Image: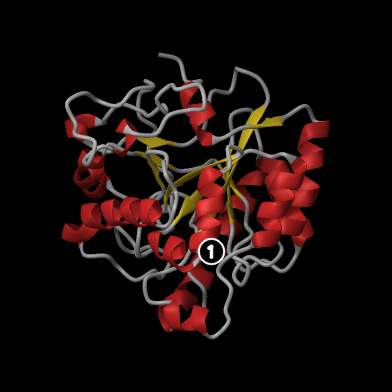
């Protein structure tokens, strides 16, 4: 019986090999690594607090505008050392069985021709299943995806079941190496994130939450410092769904169920051509976790539950 550690390592190796295909052209940019930019490990979590730092303008701080249905500001973490972007990986382990499902809506800036030829980077069936099962979720959306699927972006942004967050505009790597993803120029990092927030709003998402997910999960101290002025919190994960390019819903289901703990953040994908079994896996994962006593939450609830 394979151990959890070996399963994670196998998932990381599989993601690296599959994402390398992206650099060669035929693969789809729905790749997530097993963590941060240094050795595939997630970035260290920052100390908690549910407010953005003061003194930032609304343009510089995306956390200034969004609010919960009750009117409270969307919780973020305070800046890291030197004003660096803080990093969140999972919620508290001791506040009950709560888990956040997150879905990356990936599309790189140069994939328009492939979309025009019929390749589907969306997954309406998955969203319909989440709605039918009444599962709140956080959707990390690239700016290019929002532009391509504007009606869907608007629908997600207006649905209180979901929160829409930033997954970059281009889906290029913010540090290298990163699973074969094309590299973004270091000096363009902040502009890419801000362009994505603008693209989300222009596509009909009125209040994207002030969270950012690095393409491939890859980052380093330099990028965190560069992105600090955006006011966003970087959101990683502690459960790799393994659905990118997967062909077995059973395998994805087993992988998620074997890793989930109270407070977990699960990374999955909302990209039909690159993650074709995700919807089927979710139909199996959700009832099983509920049978185990778990409930589902958005990332904002987990961040807000961290002790002050």
**Residue at which label 1 appears:** 15
**Extreme residue in the bottom direction:** 117
- Residue 270 spot, x, y in % from top left: 59, 58
- Residue 41 spot, x, y in % from top left: 43, 47
Taking the image as shown, residue 235 lies to the left or right of residue 123, namely left
Q: Secondary structure at mark 1?
A: helix
Is residue 2 visible in this depiction of the protein? no
The answer to which of 129 and 10 lies nearer the viewer is 129
The answer to which of 66 and 243 lies nearer the viewer is 66
Where residue 293 sits, quadrant-wise, is top right
Coloring applied to the structure: secondary structure
Q: Quadrant of the C terminus?
A: top left
In the image, residue 216 sits, relative to residue 121, either above or below, namely above
- Residue 279 spot, x, y in % from top left: 72, 57
**Extreme residue in the top direction:** 308
Taking the image as shown, residue 210 lies to the left or right of residue 220, namely right
Taking the image as shown, residue 222 lies to the left or right of residue 14, namely left
In the image, residue 3 sits, relative to residue 308, either above or below, namely below
Where residue 111 sits, quadrant-wise, is bottom left
- Residue 203 spot, x, y in % from top left: 42, 57
Query: How many marks do you count on the picture?
Result: 1
In the image, residue 262 sits, relative to residue 170, either above or below, namely above
Q: Residue at x 20, y 42 (%)?
A: 225
The crowding category of the residue bearing disc 1, from other C-alpha atoms within 10 Å (few below 14, some 14 to 19, many at least 20), is many
Q: Residue at x 79, y 57 (%)?
A: 250
Is residue 67 visible in this depiction of the protein? yes
């Amino acid at each position: 019986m394979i151990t959890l550690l070996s399963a994670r390592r196998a998932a990381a190796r599989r993601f690296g090999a599959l994402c390398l295909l992206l650099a060669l052209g035929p693969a789809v940019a729905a790749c997530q690594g097993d963590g941060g930019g240094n050795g595939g490990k997630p970035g260290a979590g920052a100390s908690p607090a549910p407010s953005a730092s003061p003194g930032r303008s609304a343009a510089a701080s995306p956390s200034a505008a969004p609010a919960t249905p009750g009117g409270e500001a969307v919780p973020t973490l305070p800046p890291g050392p030197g004003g660096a972007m803080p990093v969140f990986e999972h919620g508290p382990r001791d506040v009950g069985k709560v888990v956040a499902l997150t879905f990356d809506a990936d599309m790189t800036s140069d994939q328009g021709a492939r979309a025009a030829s019929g390749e589907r980077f969306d997954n309406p069936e998955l969203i319909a299943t989440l709605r039918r099962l009444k599962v709140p979720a956080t959707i990390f959306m690239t700016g290019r995806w929002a532009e391509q699927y504007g009606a869907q972006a608007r629908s997600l942004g207006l649905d209180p079941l979901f929160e829409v967050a930033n997954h970059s505009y281009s889906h290029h790597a913010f540090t290298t190496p990163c699973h074969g993803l094309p590299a973004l120029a270091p000096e363009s990092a902040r502009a890419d994130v801000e362009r994505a927030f603008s693209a989300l709003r222009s596509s009909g998402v009125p209040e994207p939450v002030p969270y950012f997910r690095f393409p491939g999960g890859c980052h380093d101290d330099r990028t965190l410092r560069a992105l600090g002025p955006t006011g966003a919190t970087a959101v990683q994960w502690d459960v790799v769904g393994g659905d990118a390019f997967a062909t077995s819903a059973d395998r994805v289901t087993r992988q998620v169920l074997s890793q989930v703990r109270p407070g977990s953040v699960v990374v999955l994908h909302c990209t039909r051509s690159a993650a074709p079994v995700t919807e089927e896996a979710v139909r199996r994962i959700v009832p099983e976790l509920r049978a185990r006593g778990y409930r589902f939450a958005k990332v904002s609830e987990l961040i807000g539950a961290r002790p002050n």
